[in-house]
Image (tube, coloured by chain):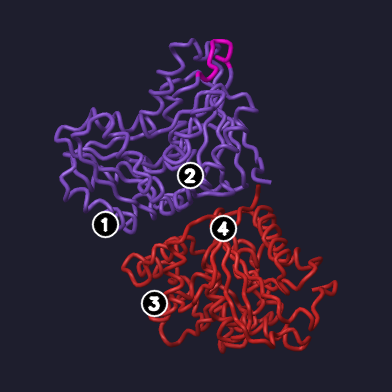
Chain colours: A purple, B red
Amino acid sequence: MSAEPKLDATSSERPIGVFDSGIGGLTVVAALRRTLPGEKILYLGDTARVPYGGKSPETVTRYSKEISDLLVAEGAKMIVAACNTASALAVPSLALSYPVPLVGVIEPGAAAAVLATRNGKIGVIATRATINSDAYGKAIRALDPAVSVTAVACPLLVPLIEEGLFDDEITRTMLRRYLDPLLRAGIDTLVLGCTHYPLLKSVIARLCGKRVTLVDSAENCALAVRALLAPSGCLSQAGHPRLDVLLTDSSEGFLRIAERSLDLTIDSLGIRELGK
Amino acid sequence: MSAEPKLDATSSERPIGVFDSGIGGLTVVAALRRTLPGEKILYLGDTARVPYGGKSPETVTRYSKEISDLLVAEGAKMIVAACNTASALAVPSLALSYPVPLVGVIEPGAAAAVLATRNGKIGVIATRATINSDAYGKAIRALDPAVSVTAVACPLLVPLIEEGLFDDEITRTMLRRYLDPLLRAGIDTLVLGCTHYPLLKSVIARLCGKRVTLVDSAENCALAVRALLAPSGCLSQAGHPRLDVLLTDSSEGFLRIAERSLDLTIDSLGIRELGK
């Protein structure tokens, strides 16, 4: 963003560090796996302090820095904040002075939404903290000031998803409430502004109808990572992919749900305490 | 529990320390206020790491110890774990060697339930961590081995309550699912095994019908605190009540909802970082 983070071809075989407040960021891992199938990925889920979506910018920034420092100490060649709340609240300030590139999910999602809209009306659903930061609104208006953005905080979707209630009457009822002001605003593009939400993609698509294009920040973040690594020769050449997962608390329930629904294979799972 | 914690009349004017993962423990504060109107109360809500209900025993114990140490450093004459998850997972081990008495909500709730039941069938609703610990089952069977306990984890109730959806169709639908196996088991007594749940008491009462007595651990915990302090002359004589609140993150939204619905006056509010 300003200072030049170190990124050169000697780092190509080191892992991509990815983190999230919990397990939702595995949707970004799944997208990275599809886009960059040869890469090693080291994922940290901060399950001891999940969720971030209702917490303050200061606290989310402190947590994000602790985690990024750990991933760099473990050899990560770059960091992906696979968490919209961390991307909105912490990445802009942290990335300025970080020793390796630090990429969030907001700008890629905003860029894809601006490309997708035909009527200039974009909707955003996300956690309360992400919506309060107006990170998507700012990023979208920076690309096209003429676009109008309607944003709705959906604080209950993460708990519903973590309970595995993907296609459940309660989830549909809640989604109808959240989506109603967006559909009334006439949006033709909807940003899924939380890494958990792709797990509800089919239900959201059904409720929105064919007129609305869904923008999944996971896919676009993976493309942004490739665009960053490829020109500097930092993509893995060896092609020995791995997925190593660290959690800050031993909460494995949703990990198994995510592994199944995202068709990911986890090569190792460890617990690492933070904030001591 | 075993070693004699220090409690003597010289500590009478010091505050009662109360903690919870978040704001739900204010239901215990409200009960303490009614039972012991002259006491100073120092409340800590760990909003930077809320919720505890899905986290591991090790992590919940580490958090509970950090918080209790802080409350003792601030002069607390005793500690109330106003959080069922912390009471279930951390209090039994911590209380053994703690310098001041440490009281949880499980035993008082269990005792009240055993007194209330007429048919020997008690239901418990709580977070997943509390249910997995079987803390209520053990405490109830220790008092009366003939009682049968049916326990249901209700992981979505805390998020619904924190959104203020007290008497909402979504909350009622979710509650019907959670309560169904309890009502089919023929319970006549239901323990509200999470300090958030008293905020849903009227809805739960309506869904359960008059046959079922609701046991609110907040009320019974307040009575247990009085029973502990009174014999050693440790109740405040001065009668200058105060409620000082510390949060670990600046998340005030639900605090205002709780203040209103519980009719509490907060004299001071501060932020205190933990886990650094």
**Residue B203, disc:** 3
* Badge 2: residue crowd in 10 Å (few <14, some 14–19, many ≥20): some
Q: Name the residue under label 4.
A: B271
The residues bearing labels 2 and 3 have C-alpha atoms spaced at a distance of 32 Å
**Residue A276 appears left or right of A22:** right
The residues bearing labels 4 and 1 have C-alpha atoms spaced at a distance of 34 Å
- Residue A104, horizontal then vertical, whole percent: 43, 32
Q: Mark 1 points at which residue?
A: A177
Q: What element carries label 2?
A: helix
Magenta span contains residue A122: no
Q: Residue drawn at (40%, 33%), measured in percent from left and top?
A: A105
The residues bearing labels 3 and 4 have C-alpha atoms spaced at a distance of 33 Å
Tag 4–tag 1 contact (CB < 8 Å): no
Boundaries of the magenta span: A4-13
Asked if residue B132 is positioned above or below residue A59 in the image, the reply reads below
Q: Is mark 4 on a helix, strand or loop?
A: strand
Q: Do labels 1 and 2 share a chain?
A: yes
- Residue A30, horizontal then vertical, whole percent: 44, 31
Q: Are marks 2 and 4 on the same chain?
A: no
The residue at the far right in this view is B3
Task: Report in which chain the residue with disc 4 lies.
Answer: B
Tag 1–tag 2 contact (CB < 8 Å): no
From the viewer's perspective, is the residue at label 1 or at label 2 nearer? 1
From the viewer's perspective, is the residue at label 2 or at label 3 nearer? 3
Closer-to-camera residue (A228/A245): A228
